[in-house]
Amino acid sequence: MQIVEVKDGKSKKAFLNVARALYENDANWVCPLDKEVECVFDPGENLNFNNGEAKRWLLKDDSGKHIGRIAAFFNRNSIDIEAQPTGGCGFFECIDNNEAANLLFDTAKTWLKSQGMEAMDGPINFGERDKFWGLLVNGFTQPAHSVPYNPPYYQALFENYGFRVYFKQEGFILDVKEGVPERFKRIAERVANNPEYTFEHLDYNKIDKHVADFTAVFNEAWEDFKEDFEPMETDYVYKFLKNAKAILEKEFIWLAYHEGKPIGIYLMYPDVNQIFKSFNGKLNLWNKLRLLYMVKTKKMTRAKGVLMGLTPKYQKKGLEVGFIHHIEEALKGKPEYTELEFWWVGDFNPPMRKIWSAVGANPAKTYITYRYMFDPNAPYARYPIPS
C-alpha cells in the first residue's frame, strides 16, 4: 500500500471519488457536494487557514486503486487552551481493513506530531461543528445535509487504533404529525407571549441588524466552550445566508430579544440532502435548475435544526420553548414538512437533551467524537459532563 499526498487537481478529484467508490452500493449515503468538501481545504474560502494548516492524503493498494483517504489539520488558537496541543483528523474513508486504516491514521499522526501536536480528535471538520463532525455509530439511515454518515465498521477501525471516546452526540428526530405534547405546548405559548420578550424571524429587510444580532448572541452564548470556541464573524453569517437563500425558510430562523437586546438564536433549514441525493456531489447548471424546481415544488419534507442558544444571563429560564412555539406555528403553514432532525446534542449538554425529549423528539442517531493521545502513557480526560 502507498500513501500519496493530495497536491494537484488529479489527486483532489481522486480524494472526492474515494467516497463515491466506497459507497457505490449504499442506498442511504448522500454524496456531499464536491464544492463543499473542497471549500474546507481552500485557504481562500476557509478562515481557519488564518490560524491553522491542513493536509490530506490518499491510500492506494498494490494495484494502484484508491482504497482510502484522510485529512489532518490544527488551529493554533486552540493549542494553548487544551491540556495538550491537539489537532484533528477527518474526511476519513477506508475499506474494511485495519492495516489500511492504521496507515491512514499513522500518516495524520506523524504530520500532526511534526507540527507540535500531542493528540488528535476525529473524525472532525476543519471548521464549524455543524458540518462533518463525529462518527456515526447508531442510526444508519439517510443523513441530513452535512451530517456524518459512514459504514458501521468504521467504529472498530477507530477503536482498534486506540481512539477513545471524547464525547458523544445525539441526533433527535421529531414527527411533525404527532406534534409536541400538550403540556409542553401550554408552557411554550406562555413563554412566547411573555411581554418581556420578543421573537423575530429572519427578515431580509432587516438583514444587517439580524446578522449583527445573530453573531453577537452566538459569540456570547458559546464563549464558555473555551476549548472549541472560535468567535463567529458577521461575514460568515452573510455568506451562509447568501449561499443558502434559495432553500431557506425565513420562519425557520429566529432571534429572541429582551427589551430590544438580542439574547437568543435558533437556526433550522430544510434538509437539502433530499434533493442532493440524486446530484452525486455535482452542482452544475443543470442541477442548480433542478434544485430551484424541486424547492419551488416543495420536494423537501424534512428540516434540520442546527443550533439553539441563549446568552448566559438568560439560560435556564425556559426561553428555548419560545422558539419551539414559533417553529410549530410556522409549520402549520408548511404542511410539506413531516419530520425535524435536531443536530446535534452533545452528552455534555444535558439541559438541551432534556428540552428535545420534552418536545417529544426521540434520540434516533448516535455519533462519537474520539480523541487519540500520541503518548499512550499521557493522562487522558474525557470532555467533562456537568453533574
Image (tube, helix red, strand yellow):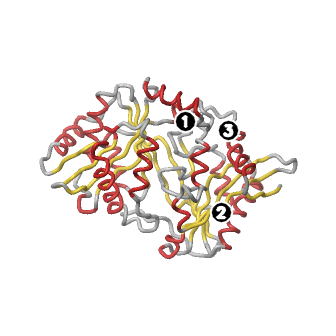
The foreground one among 304 and 214 is: 214
**Image quadrant assignment for residue 328:** top left
The foreground one among 282 and 22 is: 282
Q: Decide: marks 1, 2 in contact (CB < 8 A)?
A: no
Q: The residue under label 2 is which amino acid type?
A: Gly
Q: The residue under label 1 is which amino acid type?
A: Gln
| Disc 3 packing (10 Å; few <14; some 14–19; many ≥20) | some
Q: Earlier in the sequence, mark 3 or mark 1?
A: 3
Secondary structure state at the residue bearing disc 3: loop
**Image quadrant assignment for residue 277:** top right
Q: Is residue 251 above or below residue 124?
A: above
Q: Is residue 61 above or below residue 25?
A: below
Residue 340 visible here: yes
**Residue displayed at 55% across by 34% down:** 276
Secondary structure state at the residue bearing disc 2: loop
Residue 142 is marked as 1
The foreground one among 355 and 336 is: 336
Residue 196 location, x and y as percent? 13, 51
Q: Earlier in the sequence, mark 1 or mark 2?
A: 1
Secondary structure state at the residue bearing disc 1: loop
Q: Nearer the viewer, mark 2 or mark 3?
A: 3
**Distance from the alpha carbon under mark 3 to that under mark 1:** 12 Å
Residue 162 is marked as 2
For this view, does 181 lie left or right of residue 259? right
Residue 284 location, x and y as percent? 60, 35
* Residue wearing tag 3: 23
Residue 175 location, x and y as percent? 38, 32
Q: The residue under label 3 is which amino acid type?
A: Tyr
